Structure formats: C-alpha cells, structure tokens
C-alpha cells in the first residue's frame, strides 16, 4: 500500500494505491519499484504529449482514440529504434518531422518492421 500526499494549488490531498507482488521485498524496495514505474510512465506520456500533441487530439468516434494512440506509440518505438547516422543526435520530434518531409527517411524508419514469414 502506498499513500501519496500532495498539495496542489493550496489544497492538500492524499491517495491510497494498493500493489500486489509475489516476491517478498521490504517497503523501501517496493517504493523504489513503484517510483521507477511511474517515472517511466510519466516520461512516455510527456513524449507523446510534447512530440505527438496527444492531449490536443479530439477523436471520440468508436475506437478511433485508442487506435490512434496505439499508432502513436508504434511510431514512437520506431523513431527511438532508428539508429542511422542521419538521425544521430536528433530529438524524437525532429525525427518525426523529418519522416514527414523526406520519404527516404520515412522508409528507413518503417524498414525496421520485420516482414511476416510463411503463408
């Protein structure tokens, strides 16, 4: 159990979250794991919002919001994995823009998707 306390705009609040684990650990070890998990989650959300402007998207029909969210995460993974010399030192946002401007670079990013073998 983790009890988080914070003050936002002068208003104090707390939240209790429960976690289940199968490995016996101390409270400090579990807290370190929880903070690490939220650090990763928050950094992913930040990149999706800043680079892909996810919070500005307004798709409500059917599963369009969920489908576009998955496509943005796929694009982010492909852009992060692309390691050519032309992308070295460039931010994810710059890589995304270049992929939209230059078809050769877009094909380099998309070429990372393995082809399905077999029938």
Image (cartoon, rainbow, N blue to C red):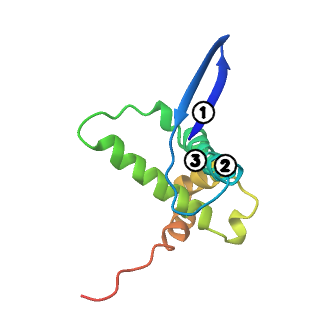
Q: Are marks 3 and 1 in contact (CB under 8 Å)?
A: no
Q: Disc 2 vs disc 3: which is toward the camera?
A: 2
The residue at 41%/52% (across/down) is 70
Q: Position of residue 114 (x, y in %)?
A: 44, 78
Identify the residue position indicated by label 3 in the image. 41
How far from the left and from the top, in percent, is residue 67? 34, 49
- State the SS at label 2: helix
Image quarter where the C terminus lies is bottom left
Q: Residues within 10 Å of mark 1 (few under 14, many from 20)?
A: few
Residue 53: give x, y in percent of width and height: 53, 37
Circle 2 packing at 10 Å, graded few (<14), some (14-19), many (20+), is: few
Among numbered discs 3 and 1, the one appearing first in the sequence: 1
| Precedes in sequence: disc 2 or disc 3 | 2
Q: Please state if 21 lies on the left or on the right of 40 as rendered.
A: left
Task: Nearest to the eye among marks 3 and 1: give it.
Answer: 1
Q: Residue at x 46, y 50 (%)?
A: 72
Q: CA distance from mark 2 to mark 3?
A: 21 Å
Mark 2 lies on residue = 27
Q: Residue at x 55, y 70 (%)?
A: 108
Say which quadrant the N terminus sits in: top right
Q: Which residue is mark 1?
A: 3
User: Looking at the image, do the residues carrying marks 2 and 1 touch, with CB atoms under 8 Å apart?
Assistant: no
The image shows residue 60 at horizontal and vertical percentages of: 30, 33
Gap in angstroms between the C-alphas marked 3 and 1: 19 Å
């Amino acid at each position: 159990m983790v009890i988080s306390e914070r003050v936002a705009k002068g208003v104090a609040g707390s939240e209790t979250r429960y976690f289940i684990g199968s490995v016996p650990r101390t409270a400090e070890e579990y807290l370190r794991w929880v903070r690490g998990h939220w650090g990763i989650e928050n950094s992913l959300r930040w990149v999706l919002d800043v680079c892909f402007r996810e919070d500005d998207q307004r798709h409500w029909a059917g599963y369009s919001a969920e489908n576009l969210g998955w496509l943005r995460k796929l694009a982010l993974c492909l852009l992060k994995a692309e390691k050519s010399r032309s992308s070295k030192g460039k931010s994810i946002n710059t890589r995304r823009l270049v992929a939209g401007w230059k078809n050769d670079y877009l094909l380099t990013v998309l070429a990372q998707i393995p082809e399905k073998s077999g029938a």
